[in-house]
Amino acid sequence: MRFSFAIIAAVLCVSQSIALPTGYEGQLYKRTKPKVVTMTVTEGCGCPPTSIPVLNTIPPATSSVPPPATSTVPPPATSYVPPPASTHVPPPPPPATTHVPPPPANQCPEPSKSVFLLRGFKSHGMDHFYTTNVQEMNNAVSKLGYKKESHAAKVYTHAEVNTIPLHRVFNGHANDHFYTTSSNERDNAIHKLGYKDEGVAAHIFATQICGSVPLHRLYNAHGKNHFYTISESEAANAAHNGYTREGVAGFVHPPH
């Protein structure tokens, strides 16, 4: 045992005279600082006691830092979104009925209060004229070139229950009398079409109640003439001869 230590001591003594190359430790492992452990040997060598460095370097397992995972979630099988079956939105169901029940008998005007709606026609200038005033019609016939025709209907001269006014305007340039229950139509005719307000011709029903019938309204653009009648056959004949239907002016009692 003493002999073995003597050999080791001799080898270590010799190694003191051999200088390690500069940077030797750095060539073994990058960025690794060696740990030095010293051992004192004095026995069987004849050399002075010396502390001999012994390398005890333990390299790290690795200095490589793995890159972060770059894998992504695989895309869905398809990105196609099918359209809806239809963009049509069905309309709400219609009301069960559009029938307007007639008012009670006590909410209809007294038939005895109704008067004739007189009708005249002027062929020169082509104008139909309607009035409840007998004197006004007689003046139109005797002085203004109108011809009296059959009575147009029975109406009311004053406001009665469930009635509305039938406005009357006149365009002297076009020689046309125009009748409407719409105040907007009346105002438009006055402010934009050259008509003059002539007041209220009569009072009639807005809906078909109290035994009333439709008063058809037609217009001849060529002759600048409005025409009103309760006769469907007469309205159809006028429409066949240049007149255009403009709906119903209102509802009135038949003249007989």
Image (cartoon, rainbow, N blue to C red):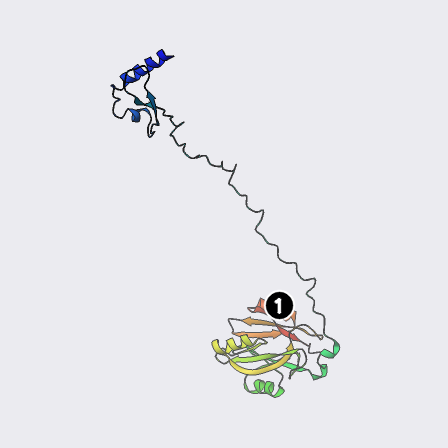
Residue at image coords 58%, 79%:
167
Residue at image coords 30%, 27%:
26
From the image, which quarter does the N terminus lie in? Answer: top left
Q: Position of residue 159 (x, y in %)?
A: 64, 82
Q: Is residue 175 above or below residue 30?
A: below
Q: Is residue 255 above or below residue 29?
A: below
Q: Position of residue 20 (x, y in %)?
A: 26, 22
Quadrant in which residue 198 is drawn: bottom right
Query: Which of the pair 61/81 is nearer the observer?
Result: 61
Query: Which of the pair 211/175 is nearer the observer?
Result: 211
The residue under label 1 is 236
Which SS class for mark 1?
A: helix
23 left or right of 256 in image: left
From the image, which quarter does the C terminus lie in? Answer: bottom right
Quadrant in which residue 119 is drawn: bottom right
Q: Position of residue 80 (x, y in %)?
A: 52, 41
